[in-house]
């Protein structure tokens, strides 16, 4: 186990360095800059701002200074469009919000998707299976930027059950969580059904039935455990996808998470903020994948961690 974790760290660090380097170079070659949009800025002011943030230095020196500040102090630099705040401060405030949205959406997806997949598997080729998979297909097909306005129109503007936007009480969280989690719930339902169908036909399940175990024990104690392997393997990248895919949800529902800041930073060419958010997403993706690999080995003893 320790050897596996050490190997993963040895892979994660150079991967993050590569991601940071590519993102840094790409951001610098994108047309436009952080101070040549919106209202016109006097040329003297723009020169002073570029000098303040060392944007006139050679590209290699900018990269070296940025990387050294990150490695030595964990400093991601100033946010160009938020003069009194650093990238570290913005991420420290917005990351918990995005994580909260991601965790709640993941719980919603598991509570909805897994039972739907189990019903589809144990009632294969019946109307329950058809209904479950049709619901999953709708969930996969409808993008979040379509689903979010529909939820707001029905449950906020027509029924007045939930607020339109913001992130304060549990009533503010319902629609964003459903919007973020529903596509993943649909995908989990399809994965669970496929995994369960393979396991249900296996020898050890037939043996369990031959021993006289109840159908409930066969399904919950044997088939479900094996059928969850594809689901578990997807949870790591799925959670990362939830965080990244919540960009639209955070923007539409005016949630102060990293996704909203990332969209605004990309539009404003706020180099440091874009790089900081990308690095955080990269770390989360690789860490969650490593955790899922460990969990996968616990569920299936045939899997070896190398």
Image (cartoon, grey):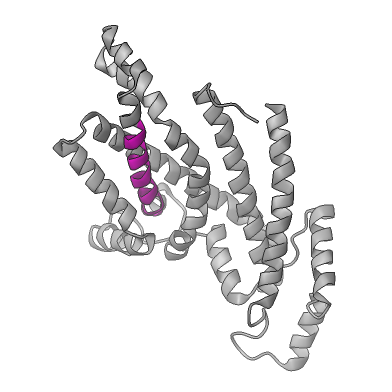
- In the image, residue 216 sits, relative to residue 253, either above or below, namely above
Residue drawn 37% across and 46% down?
187
Q: Quadrant of residue 198?
A: top left
* Tally of numbered discs: 0
On-image quarter of the N terminus = top right
- In the image, residue 9 sits, relative to residue 142, either above or below, namely above
Q: Which residues are magenta?
A: 174-195
Residue drawn 62% across and 55% down?
93
In this image, 155 relative to 259: left or right? Answer: left
- Give the x, y percent position of residue 29: 68, 77
In this image, 234 relative to 55: left or right? Answer: left
Q: Residue furthest front?
A: 203
Residue drawn 83% across and 77% down?
58
- In the image, residue 33 sits, relative to residue 94, either above or below, namely below
Any magenta on residue 186?
yes
- In the image, residue 222 sits, relative to residue 248, either above or below, namely above
Q: Nearer the viewer, residue 181 or 253?
A: 181
Tell me if residue 85 can be seen.
no
């Amino acid at each position: 186990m320790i050897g596996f974790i050490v190997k993963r760290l040895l892979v994660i660090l150079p991967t993050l360095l590569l991601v940071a380097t590519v993102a840094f170079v790409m951001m610098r070659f994108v047309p436009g800059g952080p101070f040549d949009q919106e209202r016109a800025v006097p040329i003297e002011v723009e020169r002073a701002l570029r000098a303040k943030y060392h944007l006139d230095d050679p590209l290699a020196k900018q990269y070296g200074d940025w990387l050294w500040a990150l490695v030595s102090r964990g400093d991601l630099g100033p946010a160009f469009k938020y003069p009194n705040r650093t990238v570290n401060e913005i991420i420290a405030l917005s990351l918990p919000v995005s994580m909260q949205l991601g965790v709640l959406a993941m719980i919603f997806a598991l509570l909805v998707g897994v039972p739907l997949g189990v019903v589809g598997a144990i009632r294969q080729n019946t109307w329950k299976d058809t209904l479950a998979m049709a619901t999953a297909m709708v969930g996969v097909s409808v993008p979040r930027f379509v689903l979010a306005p529909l939820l707001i129109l029905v449950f906020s503007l027509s029924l007045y059950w939930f607020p339109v936007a913001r992130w304060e009480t549990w009533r503010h969280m319902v629609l964003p969580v459903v919007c973020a989690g529903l596509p993943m719930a649909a995908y989990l339902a399809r994965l669970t059904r496929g995994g369960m169908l393979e396991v249900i036909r296996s020898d050890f399940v037939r043996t369990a039935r031959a021993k006289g175990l109840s159908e409930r024990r066969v399904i919950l104690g044997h088939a479900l455990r094996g059928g969850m392997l594809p689901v578990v393997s997807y949870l790591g990248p799925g959670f990362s996808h939830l965080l990244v895919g919540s960009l639209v949800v955070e923007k539409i529902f005016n949630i102060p998470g990293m996704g909203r800041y990332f969209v605004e930073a990309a539009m404003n060419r706020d180099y440091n903020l874009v790089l900081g958010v990308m690095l955080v997403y990269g770390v989360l993706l690789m860490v969650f994948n490593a955790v899922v690999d460990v969990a996968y080995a616990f569920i299936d003893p045939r899997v070896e961690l190398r």
